[in-house]
């Protein structure tokens, strides 16, 4: 192996390295060792058996084993003893369920309240009017008015003049053209 050392040793290290490379290269290019006599004898026996089977015209998968023959006989015997099953009668289709009334969203209810109202309303007033008319009730949130306000602002920003709401003043809305 190469030695570590000073510059004086560099020439020796280089020579040792090149010798190692040459030896490795020579071992790679050497012909493979010949097979042992036992391996050669087994290989010839296998080739002879294969040639014999090919001469007979049958291959391994075409010749059933004793176990396969017994299994096939058992299957045939059991098939003769069974009666044919009667075809199943198709079941009657279930009647279609009536669709439940779709729950009105807070925005849809707010549009209805604003359209019926003659004065601009705040989000808190819209929530109170929706609950009074039983159009929409909060599912248990703490600040439904803040949620409604944010949804109205998002719709105005997204749809512009086609929105169902129009901002009257800060925090106050009226029904828009889309309502």
Image (cartoon, rainbow, N blue to C red):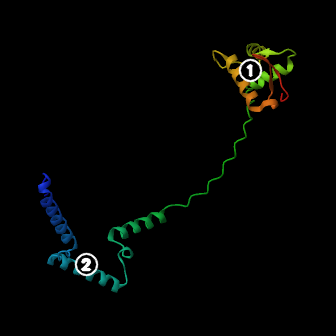
Numbered tag placed on residue 136 in the rendering: 1
Residue at horizontal 34 percent and vertical 83 percent from the top: 54
Q: Residues within 10 Å of mark 2 (few under 14, many from 20)?
A: few
Q: Nearer the viewer, residue 167 or 71?
A: 167
Q: Please, is residue 45 above or below residue 109 in the view? A: below
Residue at horizontal 73 percent and vertical 24 percent from the top: 153
**Residue 142 as seen in the image, left or right of residue 10:** right
Q: Please, is residue 124 above or below residue 11 in the view? A: above
Query: Dot 2: what SS?
Result: helix
Write down the residue under mark 2. 46
**Quadrant of the rendered structure where residue 134 is?**
top right
x and y, in percent, of residue 84 in the image: 55, 61
Q: Nearer the viewer, residue 77 or 178?
A: 178
x and y, in percent, of residue 39 in the image: 18, 75
Instruction: Single out the mark in the foreground, 2 or 1.
Output: 1
The C terminus, quarter of image: top right
x and y, in percent, of residue 157 in the image: 74, 29
Q: Nearer the viewer, residue 2 or 11?
A: 11
Numbered tag placed on residue 33 in the rendering: none
Cα distance between the residues tagged 2 and 1: 86 Å
Residue at horizontal 74 percent and vertical 24 percent from the top: 152
x and y, in percent, of residue 92 in the image: 69, 46
Q: Residue furthest front?
A: 8
Q: Nearer the viewer, residue 2 or 39?
A: 2
């Amino acid at each position: 192996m190469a030695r570590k050392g000073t510059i004086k040793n560099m020439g020796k290290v280089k020579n040792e390295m090149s010798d190692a490379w040459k030896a490795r290269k020579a071992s790679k290019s050497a012909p493979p060792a010949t097979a042992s006599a036992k391996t050669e004898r087994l290989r010839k026996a296998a080739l002879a058996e294969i040639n014999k089977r090919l001469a007979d015209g049958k291959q391994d998968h075409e010749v059933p084993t004793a176990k396969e023959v017994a299994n096939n006989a058992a299957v045939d015997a059991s098939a003769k003893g069974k009666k044919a099953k009667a075809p199943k009668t198709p079941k009657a289709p279930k009647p279609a369920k009536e669709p439940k009334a779709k729950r009105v969203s807070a925005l849809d209810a707010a549009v209805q309240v604003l359209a019926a109202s003659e004065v601009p309303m705040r989000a808190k007033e819209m929530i109170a009017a929706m609950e009074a008319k039983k159009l929409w009730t909060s599912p248990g949130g703490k600040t439904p008015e803040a949620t409604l306000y944010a949804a109205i602002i998002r719709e105005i920003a997204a749809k512009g003049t086609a929105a169902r709401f129009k901002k009257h003043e800060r925090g106050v809305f009226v029904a828009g053209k889309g309502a």
